[in-house]
Amino acid sequence: MRAVDFLLSIKRGEIDDVKLIEGFRERVIAEDEKYNIFITLAEPDESFPRKRLLSGVPIAVKDNIVTKNLRTTCASQVLENFVPSYDATVVERIKSEGGVIVGKTNMDEFAMGALGTTSYFGPTRNPLNPSLSPGGSSSGSAAAVSSGLVPMALGSDTGGSIRLPAAWTGIYGLKPTYGLVSRYGLVSYSDSLDQIGPMASSIFDLELLFGVIMGWDEKDPTTYDKHVPSEVFIKRAFMNPDPHIMSNLRVALLKEPLVHEDADQKVVDRFMDYVSELEAYGALVEEVSIPLVNKAPQIYYVIAFSDASSNLARFSGLLYGKRVVDVIDTDWDEYYMRNRKLFGWEVKRRILLGSFILSAGYYEMYYDRALRARAKLYDELNKVLAKYDVIATPGSNIPPLPLDFDASDLSRLNAIDSLLVIANLAGLPAIVIPLEVSTNTPISIQLISQKWSEDILFEIGKYIALYISKLERELEA
Amino acid sequence: MNIKIGLEVHVQLTSLKTKLFCSCSADYRGKPPNTNICPVCLGMPGSLPRVNKEAIRSAIKVALALNSNINQVLAWARKHYFYPDLPKGYQISQYDGKGVATFAKGGYIDIRVNGEKKRIKIRRINIEEDPARIVYPTGDAETSSYILLDYNRSGIALLEIVTEPDMNSPEEVRAFLEKLRSILEHLEVSDLSLEGSMRADVNISVGDGEMVEVKNISGLKDIEQAIRYEVARQIDVLEKGGRIERETRHWDSTRKITKPARVKEYEEDYRYMPDPNLPFYIIPDELIEEVRKTLPELPEERAARFINQHGLSEYLAHVLVSSKALADYYEKVAELSGVKGDKVAGLIVTDLLGWIDSEDLSNISRIVPPEDLAEVVKLLEKNEITIKMAKEMIPLLVRGEKPRQIIERMGWSVIRNRAVLEKIVDDVLKENPQVLKDIERNPRVVQFIIGKVLEKTGKKGDPKIIAEIVREKIRLS
């Protein structure tokens, strides 16, 4: 059931607001066996505030977003026993609107991975096809939504971690403009790329959750205060789209992901069928090429790994988290070395590479150049967005990979990375909208727009959901 | 032998209400351990820093007072190292390079040693966060088998003030630190009488020896002692034909010696990087101008005013302004007594200071209220007491007695009534008829008579008046 329909029914007095969370724990225990979605379950609490925007809606939260008194592990052994003392700003906002946090979802360890397979708690399976990866790193949140356990979930997206799993599990996901959603309480991976965003099985629910969590936060100095007010999104979440949106739409179809040597031809062809439909509905679609997009993964790796090496320096088991050896038994160097062995392989790899990049003499060679390339990419994307309303790519240009895929084979992942990380590097909002859902080859579209223009992405998303993909029905207000 | 000393002084901005990056109180002293803390200053996963604007204002004040050039693009850098007092694995500080800059560059402080003026150049000023406080249960790092950590101090705003190696003696260092302290007190940004509020790393090289760094010495007294020790040690090594290698040493404040760092400390690579959580901030010209206009009178100007308007000697004026509390005290006593100049200043500097521990200087007004000293000055001015009595009263005032009480208890109060004194002189002359005969041969007879008269008045007679009377009488006879 869509959260918006549920909330409208409550408003009309047709159903009770605890209905959605009733029996939730039992359902999860049954489903979780199949997909390994949750790391920690909360006891669904009926004491949520009534008659608010999200009253009684069960919401799953990625396990790198801290929740007061509810274990937050980042899917790492390092934080296996970490229970935060405070709520992230987004969690506070959900709770004060009556949303019910039902559990913490599985993910790649510290959000580092594309398949959900680096989790200390084991991989999450794709509800569309349990032998496939649901995509990462927000693997559990995507599976929680895709399996129908919850209508909406929070993910985080540093280099595609909301959008890839959305694309692979056939749901909606938004990576907001950098600075539009508070990161206070999100365990940092790469601070200038990380954004929390909504994931949902309905575009209407996606917009509603976004409306609740978005907006300036005094606790996060990187949030921006002159944005479209949250009321606009909250109101429009209960409204059908502008019927004329397609006729005025200018779409730049990004060439590089379509012709990438590792792109899957079947996926690209099917995606192009839908692009033709967009045109049929009145959109102007033109192909654009930005060759720098092919270098985006390298730019991303340098920045993200450097930040990661810095952000993960705090995990030593001293103040919180797991400790294998005590200070009293050893010296400090040994203490840090042994406790930090608890990180998984992929996390260690990124910390080591990042530490190397930041060390004396290499900063200028790598980090500084990556920052300049990032600025250039930003300029090139914005030049395109000055002429077009959105840049379009497939949500993924390959089908979901099997769970036993060797993640060290970087080339396949490079194909998807390049189309995903550009939005993070440029701080632009990007939405993934499912076009068709199938057990092996779900097809989706990613739309990237100018900063602070999420409103247009939702309008297009709703139009596609109702009239092109026909995955949803109109709202009956 | 040529001695070169450079300082890296860390001073806490104790006048701030809150810590540098969170809203915890800046007043951490005397609180139970680990009670003045929050997710931010504990570096809890997910927490984000936000800059205390008042700290920037204080730093601007200091930079202007030290004639330093403020870099108007305020940026923060992470300085990485593993140590248990550093909860994030990095310290948020400032740095010159890697796309960021130090807070202010250049500047100087003029000092006086043995009446000679000297200019000590400032290299740079940075703002940074204080780490947690390490408590050694035995009081000493080497004999303690474990440590205790108190995070109440974690995140307190510090200014790091780095000098050029311009000082050539421990006396110059002391003069520099006293002047710096006085400037910070006059700016009302720091009360450096608080324990641990001023700490320094000292670089010392003697003759052809290499530079030795003595780390983390707390308090002015210990800094001076450490330098004296280290200079003597290096001279001793050199005179015995030894060599001084570049090394880091620690100050043992109990045994009052420096000792080599336990582990060989190599040139550490701090892997500086700009902190992506704290966006660049342009310090507006207007803010700097506003701060400049509201700068208070600084020690140098105050000393000049004392010299020009109060007629103070240069020496006393500079001693007074070496501490704001002391200069304030002088001005208060001068105002209350209506007497200014060397008479009052001398009583404070040569007499009162002799009885007050230099560490208690900031409490001088509580030890001897200015009202009390002003009363002494007034009594002196009215010739009701002698300067000798005034000097004798000082230690009693320090003990908490009131001037009137002392005079009564001691049975002091000067007899200046001429008639009374004349009668006593007559009595003495009558009782000692032979002395008048000796007067021709022995001029000391006058002193003898005055002594006798004083004895009869119980030392209360004004010796000046008595002398006048005696001389008159002798001439008359």
Image: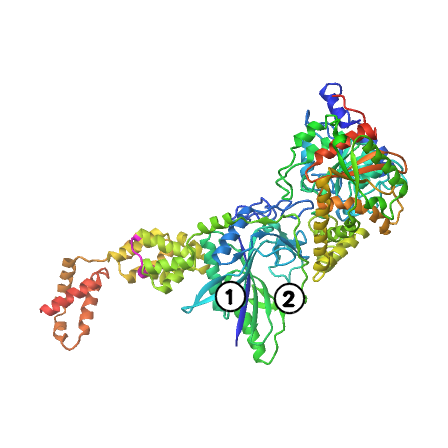
The C terminus of chain B: image quadrant? bottom left
From which residue to which does the magenta span run?
Answer: B337-344
Residue B342 on the magenta span: yes
Chain ID, mark 1? B
Q: Position of residue A26 (x, y in %)?
A: 82, 30
Q: Amino acid at mark 1?
A: Glu
Q: Residue at x 26, y 61 (%)?
A: B386
| Viewer-proximal residue among A469 and A174 | A469
| Viewer-proximal residue among A50 and A295 | A295
In the image, which disc is placed on residue B224? 1
Q: Amino acid at mark 2?
A: Ala
Relative to A433, A228 lies left or right: left
Relative to A134, A102 lies left or right: left
Identify the residue position indicated by label 2 in the image.
Answer: B261
Q: Position of residue B17 (x, y in %)?
A: 53, 46
Residue B259 on the magenta span: no
Relative to B408, A128 lies left or right: right
| Viewer-proximal residue among B191 and B8 | B8
Are the residues under badges 1 and 2 in a single subunit? yes
